Each structure stands twice: as structure tokens, then as C-alpha cells.
């Protein structure tokens, strides 16, 4: 079964760093792009960016460029989304999904940033 | 950036009725790289349609997509109780990828 398993919920303070993960299984991880999507509480879907684990080619939405870093470790079939300094406005659910037309989704990671 | 505008914002229908959801793009979507997703509360979105009209694996044939250029439509031929949810369109042919704001399909 093709699956994306995301890391658990996080509660952080403003200014802290964070790295969340998305582990793929049941398919060739290096042959498919992995994208990240933000969903703020009660709001719609926002595309953040995407990475090709085979060669680490990464594309960002201008809205998120410089705000987050997307990376991948193909040796353990895992993609990452990280922040160097969180803000309260980063509070949201974050989903990873496979490919440009997102055919397989992770269950999401809730990130809460509060002092 | 391509802006996708979905209409209506909310659609109130009864089980058994036909639903027609619209997605209009601010400029032409390359190669009809347009997808539709369904999201229920507390769940991840689910891919329904890609390439404007191709059903994803396991999606019932009551769901169909059509359109090209700037105008796209998702049609649910006969609503089942489990179809009431929020629906999003997405274009993935132009960078950056963008989503519409969503249409909420609610039970009348």
C-alpha cells in the first residue's frame, strides 16, 4: 500500500525552530515529487512547495520562499519541512502529498505556535 | 500566478440531486493540468480528478470533470450522503501551483 506517514503534532514557542517529516512507503520514493500544503484553521489549501527526492530539485511558492525549507533524505524515504524561527501565524495543519497532482496524502501534522 | 475562482461558495442540495461546481482560472491552464479534491472535516484532501477529466483510482463514476483553458467543471451526477464536503480545484501546470478557495457542498 502506498502511504505517506507524517510526524506527530508539535507545540512550539515563537522564535523556535522546527522540522516535520513525511515518510513514504509502498512505492519508489525517488521517482515521485513530494509537495507540502498548508491549511490554516478554518481556511483553504495553500501550496507551499515541492521536492524531487531523486535529485533534490526544489520549487517554492513565492508566498513561502525564504520562510520555510523543504528537503529530503532519499536513503530513508523521508521529506522534511522546516522553519528556523516560528511565528504565531505558522499555526496550521501541514500536509505532504505525492506528485504535482496530489494523488496520495499524509494525514497531516498540526503545528501550534504560541507563547 | 494563476488565480482560481470557485463558484458557488456554498451549494445546498439534497441526496440524489446533481451537483455542478465551477472553477475559473485567471489565465489559461497549461495542458489542462487541473485537479479536483474533496475534503471532509478532520481529514486530508482526496484526489478526485486530474488532467481536468481523468478520475483518480477508486473514484466512483458519478464524479466527472470537464473543461479546458480557463473554465472547468466538476459534476457529481447523483449525490450520495458521503459526498457532502468541501471541494477544491488546483492547477499544477503553471508555477506556482495554486488552489481555488473551495466550494462547500451542504445538505439541503
Image: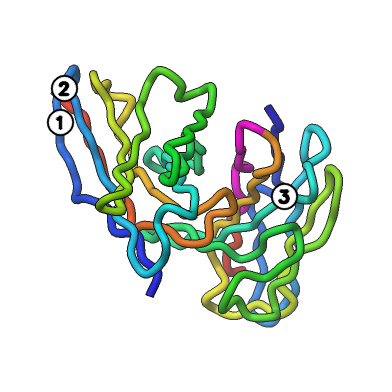
Tell me the quarter of the picture where residue B62 sits: bottom right
Which residue range is magenta in the image? B95-103
Question: Which circle marks residue B33 in the picture?
Answer: 3
| Disc 2 versus disc 3: nearer the observer | 3
- The residue that appears at 30% across and 40% down in the rendered structure is A80
Q: Position of residue B12 (x, y in %)?
A: 65, 63
Residue A85, placed above or below residue B21: above
| Disc 2 versus disc 1: nearer the observer | 2
Check disc 2: other Cα within 10 Å, few if <14, some if 14-19, many if 20+. few
Inspect the magenta stretch and tell me whether residue B96 lies in it.
yes
Residue B72, placed above or below residue A69: below
Element marked by disc 1: strand
Check disc 3: other Cα within 10 Å, few if <14, some if 14-19, many if 20+. some
Check disc 1: other Cα within 10 Å, few if <14, some if 14-19, many if 20+. some
Residue denoted by label 1: A12
Tell me the quarter of the picture where residue A55 sits: top left
Q: Mark 1 lies on which chain?
A: A
Tell me the distance, in whole angstroms, between the alpha carbons under discs 2 and 1.
7 Å
Tell me the distance, in whole angstroms, between the alpha carbons under discs 2 and 3.
38 Å
Question: Which circle marks residue A111 in the picture?
Answer: none
| Disc 3 versus disc 1: nearer the observer | 3
Query: Marks 1 and 3: in contact by CB < 8 Å?
Result: no
Amino acid at each position: 500500500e502506498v502511504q505517506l506517514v507524517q510526524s506527530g503534532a508539535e507545540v512550539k514557542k515563537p522564535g523556535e525552530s522546527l522540522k516535520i517529516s513525511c515518510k513514504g512507503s509502498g512505492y519508489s520514493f525517488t521517482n515521485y515529487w513530494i509537495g507540502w500544503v498548508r491549511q490554516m484553521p478554518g481556511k483553504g489549501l495553500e501550496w507551499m512547495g515541492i521536492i524531487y527526492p531523486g535529485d533534490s530539485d526544489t520549487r517554492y511558492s513565492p508566498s513561502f520562499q525564504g520562510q520555510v525549507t523543504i528537503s529530503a533524505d532519499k536513503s530513508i524515504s523521508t521529506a522534511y519541512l522546516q522553519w528556523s524561527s516560528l511565528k504565531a501565524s505558522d499555526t496550521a495543519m501541514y500536509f505532504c502529498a505525492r506528485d504535482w497532482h496530489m494523488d496520495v496524502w499524509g494525514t497531516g501534522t498540526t503545528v501550534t505556535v504560541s507563547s | 500566478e494563476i488565480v482560481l475562482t470557485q463558484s458557488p461558495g456554498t451549494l445546498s442540495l439534497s441526496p440524489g440531486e446533481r451537483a455542478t461546481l465551477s472553477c475559473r482560472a485567471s489565465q489559461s491552464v497549461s495542458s489542462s493540468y487541473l485537479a479536483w479534491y474533496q475534503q471532509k472535516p478532520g481529514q486530508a484532501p482526496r484526489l478526485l480528478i486530474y488532467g481536468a477529466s481523468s478520475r483518480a483510482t477508486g473514484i466512483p463514476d458519478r464524479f466527472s470533470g470537464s473543461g479546458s483553458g480557463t473554465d472547468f467543471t466538476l459534476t457529481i451526477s447523483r449525490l450520495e450522503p458521503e459526498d457532502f464536503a468541501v471541494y477544491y480545484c488546483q492547477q499544477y501546470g503553471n508555477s506556482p501551483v495554486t488552489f481555488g478557495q473551495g466550494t462547500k457542498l451542504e445538505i439541503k
